[in-house]
Amino acid sequence: MPSSKFLTDKVALVTGASRGLGKAIAVALAKEGASLALIARSTEVLQGTLDEIRALGSVAEPYALDVSDGAAVEAVVEKITAQFGHIDVLVNNAGVTRDGLLMRMSSEAWDTVINTNLKGAFNFTKPVGRQMVKQRSGRIINISSVIGLMGNAGQANYAASKAGLIGFSKSVAREFASRGITCNVVCPGFIETDMTKDLSEDLRKKLLEKIPLQRLGQPDDVAGVVSFLTSPAASYITGQILTVDGGMVM
Ligand code: NAP
């Protein structure tokens, strides 16, 4: 009997898959039958994700690189394509923060955030997109943030990178639409991961007051939406922003 999982025989590449949202996204796609190419800065940190996916009976391979290194990304995409044969889903999720008020923000803090969060997505979308254009199908999902929609004091670099991802995604959606490729953006609100674990109790309380659903999000809240965007049900959706934030921005 054919499998009812919609990603059976599909290959998904997820960046920043060692923990947090990337790990939850990779596992969610594996549950739908995808084989996974997982990216982080070292292969050791990917072990937990690998174990979880392999326990589901799915295939996963780890690749170590810095997403801001364009040449390394080109080489890894070539390697993944050779190993798996094709890439059907690309999730640009790797991201960092280097917070600080603008007047005190170093060029290094600016460059690190832009080069990881925004250029990293460009670095992967170009070679993976080239291949999706040839196969005339593909789903690209870029993980932005509500901060890219609203801005935030102390996060000018992060907000710029995440707003940049939105313009980037809409352009990619327009360029690739005629080839059967969709490109969408997911904007998470405050989700409980390593990135948000150092929020003070006071800030947490203030945040909760601004979230109509009265809780911080969980990685699975975001993973489910990414999974939906890779499904047949989402085949007519492109260039869109899905905000997953408990109603914070509406
Ligand atoms: P996290 O727990 O800090 O994980 C970040 C992931 O990105 C890790 O897998 C990390 O890999 C990887 N990464 C960072 N820099 C990299 C680089 N230069 N090259 C390769 N991999 C790199 O973060 P998260 O909370 O899951 O966030 C994931 C994404 O969602 C980010 O883009 C973030 O901006 C966005 N987001 C998060 C929230 C939230 O509330 N958590 C809200 C909105 C948007 P290593 O293990 O190698 O460090």
Image (spheres, rainbow, N blue to C red):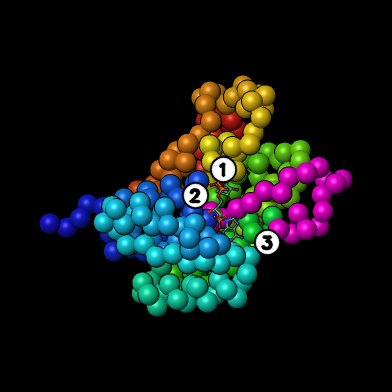
Q: Is residue 236 visible?
A: no
Q: Quadrant of residue 142?
A: bottom right
**Residue 57 in magenta?**
no
Q: Amino acid at mark 3?
A: Asn
Question: Alpha-carbon neighbours of circle 3 within 10 Å: few (<14), some, or many (≥20)?
Answer: many
Q: Is residue 40 visible?
A: yes
Q: Amino acid at mark 1?
A: Asp
Q: Which residue is mark 3?
A: 115
Pick whichever, 230 or 205, lies toward us: 205
Element type where label 3 sits in the image: helix
Pick whichever, 138 or 127, lies toward us: 127
- Please name the residue shown 55% across and 50% down the image: 143
- C-alpha distance separating marks 1 and 3: 20 Å
In the rendered structure, which disc, 3 or 2, sits on the residue that comes first in sequence? Answer: 2
Nearer to us of marks 1 and 3 is 1
Label 2 C-beta lies within 8 Å of the nearest ligand 1 atom: yes
Residue 85 as seen in the image, left or right of residue 97: left
- Please name the residue shown 78% across and 44% down the image: 100
Residue 230 as seen in the image, left or right of residue 155: left
The reply to whether the C-beta atoms of the residues labelled 3 and 2 are less than 8 Å apart is no
Q: Which residue is mark 2?
A: 19
In the rendered structure, which disc, 2 or 1, sits on the residue that comes first in sequence? Answer: 2
> Mark on residue 194?
1
In the image as oriented, which residue stretches furthest toward the right?
103
